[in-house]
């Protein structure tokens, strides 16, 4: 069996591949958006809605599946999310119009949004405390792998065979879900605690109220604001990245190639964060990587010339994705087991609201003729707000033993 407390590498690989498929779909969408603009003659506002509808689905999925994970178990809900987003992606490859495409993207988004907090909760509960932060950050590093796969497929497939064939690759996780059904066990911590307190398990309303009880209110406020600002900036910047490069005057093929180069720097960002998180702690590593993200965003929006654009794009990927990995390690550690899936899922769901607004804001500002300096300056400010919340309200959780 793959999952037990004493085989973190096996658990990491099993859940990491699911994470990779999630990232592959999100990454693929950024390239598909650039292709749809040309094929369907879409304007910037319509393009922004494609990303935002996906984020609406991700917000609802994170909350819904996070709550279900506390009631049905981590494993079954993880498999459920894989099936939802992979089947939805396969169907979206068959669409012929804008309306049907964004409807399907909503359902794809629910699965994508639900998979991430459920997977991070499962891993947090089943690895030793001394390596928990590092393992969860490494789990998030599979996101970079998914983006790399998406960039490679998009670079070689979309210009030749079109975006539909590329999307069909994102339907393959349905097969992996079948593997997880038999190769992955339920969280042993969840099984043990659930069998002992099944009758005392808090109702949904009680669990949601507990998030804002005096004991957890500071952590909840901090997580909600940080998740919102991080997701707002990430999806606003990265879903538009290939399109922004096209608008800066580069061809769609060059745009895909440059985005692939920038994406490569995500992996060292994760690895550095994973190394630091068990040495400096979650709070200060997250603060450092978010400050790096803010500076890089401002630089990317200001510079011209491909060398400078690539430099700040690489730094943006390095710092932003390192911050993401640390945030996923930090979030489940804020709550006890009974509300851990709910707390992590709801925080991610609130963040996805930012994922709705980010792409829409970019599309709206571009259509109004706003400069990229202004657009990326907004993202810089949003990240600074997240940093302030962490410094003021965050507490260190390195070495904290979770109630298993």
Image (cartoon, grey):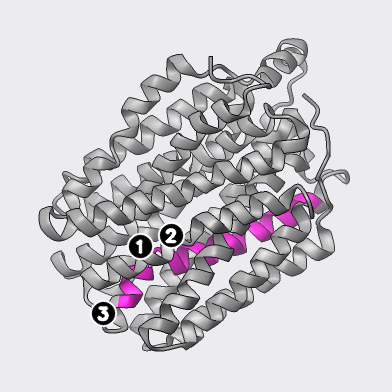
Q: Quadrant of the C terminus?
A: top right
Q: Position of residue 128 (x, y in %)?
A: 74, 30
Q: Nearer the viewer, residue 391 or 53?
A: 391
For residue 260, which numbered disc appears in the image? 1
Residue 46 visible in rendering: no
Could you tell whether 80 is left or right of 328 in the image?
Answer: left
Q: CA distance from mark 2 to mark 3?
A: 20 Å
Q: CA distance from mark 3 to mark 1?
A: 14 Å
For residue 275, which numbered disc appears in the image? none
Looking at the rendered structure, the number of numbered marks drawn on it comes to 3
Above or below residue 389? Residue 186 is above
Dots 3 and 1: beta carbons under 8 Å?
no
Q: Is residue 222 magenta?
A: yes
Q: Which residues are magenta?
A: 219-245
Q: Secondary structure at mark 2?
A: helix
Q: CA distance from mark 2 to mark 1?
A: 6 Å
> Which of label 3 and label 1 is nearer to you?
1
Q: Residue at x 75, y 47 (%)?
A: 278
Q: Nearer the viewer, residue 322 or 261?
A: 261
Q: Residue at x 69, y 71 (%)?
A: 385
Q: Is residue 251 magenta?
A: no
Q: Residue at x 55, y 16 (%)?
A: 185
Mark 3 lies on residue: 250
Dots 2 and 1: beta carbons under 8 Å?
yes
Q: Residue furthest right?
A: 214
Q: Residue at x 71, y 54 (%)?
A: 276
């Amino acid at each position: 069996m793959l999952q037990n407390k004493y085989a973190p590498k096996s658990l990491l690989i099993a859940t990491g591949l699911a994470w990779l498929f999630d990232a592959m779909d999100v990454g693929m969408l950024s390239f598909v958006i650039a292709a749809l603009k040309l094929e369907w003659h879409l304007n910037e506002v319509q393009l922004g809605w494609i990303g935002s509808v996906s984020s609406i689905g991700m917000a609802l999925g994170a909350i819904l599946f996070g709550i279900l994970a506390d009631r049905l178990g981590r494993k079954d809900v993880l498999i459920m999310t894989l099936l939802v987003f992979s089947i939805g992606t396969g169907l979206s490859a068959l669409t012929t119009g804008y309306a049907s495409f964004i409807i399907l993207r909503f359902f794809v988004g629910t699965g994508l949004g639900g998979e991430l907090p459920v997977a991070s909760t499962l891993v947090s509960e089943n690895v030793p405390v001394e390596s928990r932060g590092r393992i969860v950050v490494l789990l998030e590093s599979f996101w970079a792998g998914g983006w790399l796969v998406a960039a490679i497929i998009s670079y070689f497939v979309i210009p030749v065979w079109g975006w539909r064939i590329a999307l069909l690759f994102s339907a393959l996780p349905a097969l992996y879900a079948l593997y997880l059904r038999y190769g992955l066990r339920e969280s042993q911590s969840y099984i043990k605690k659930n069998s002992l307190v099944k009758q005392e398990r808090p109702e949904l309303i009680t669990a949601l109220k507990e998030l804002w009880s005096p004991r957890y209110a500071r952590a909840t406020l901090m997580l909600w604001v940080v998740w919102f600002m991080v997701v707002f900036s990430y999806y606003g910047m990265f879903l538009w990245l290939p399109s922004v490069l096209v608008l800066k005057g580069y061809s769609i093929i060059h745009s895909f190639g440059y985005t692939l180069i920038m994406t490569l720097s995500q992996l060292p960002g994760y690895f550095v964060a994973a190394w630091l998180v068990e040495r400096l702690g979650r709070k200060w590593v997250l603060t450092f990587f978010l400050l790096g993200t803010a500076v890089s965003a401002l630089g990317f929006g200001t510079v011209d010339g491909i060398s400078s654009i690539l430099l700040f794009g690489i730094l943006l990927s390095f710092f932003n994705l390192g911050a993401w990995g640390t945030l996923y390690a930090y979030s489940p550690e804020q709550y006890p087991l009974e509300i851990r899936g709910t707390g992590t899922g709801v925080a991610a769901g609130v963040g996805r609201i930012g994922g709705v607004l980010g792409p829409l804001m970019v599309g709206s500002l571009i259509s109004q003729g706003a400069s990229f300096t202004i657009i990326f300056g907004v993202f810089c400010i949003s990240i600074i707000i997240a940093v302030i919340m962490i410094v003021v309200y965050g507490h260190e959780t390195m070495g904290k033993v979770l109630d298993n």
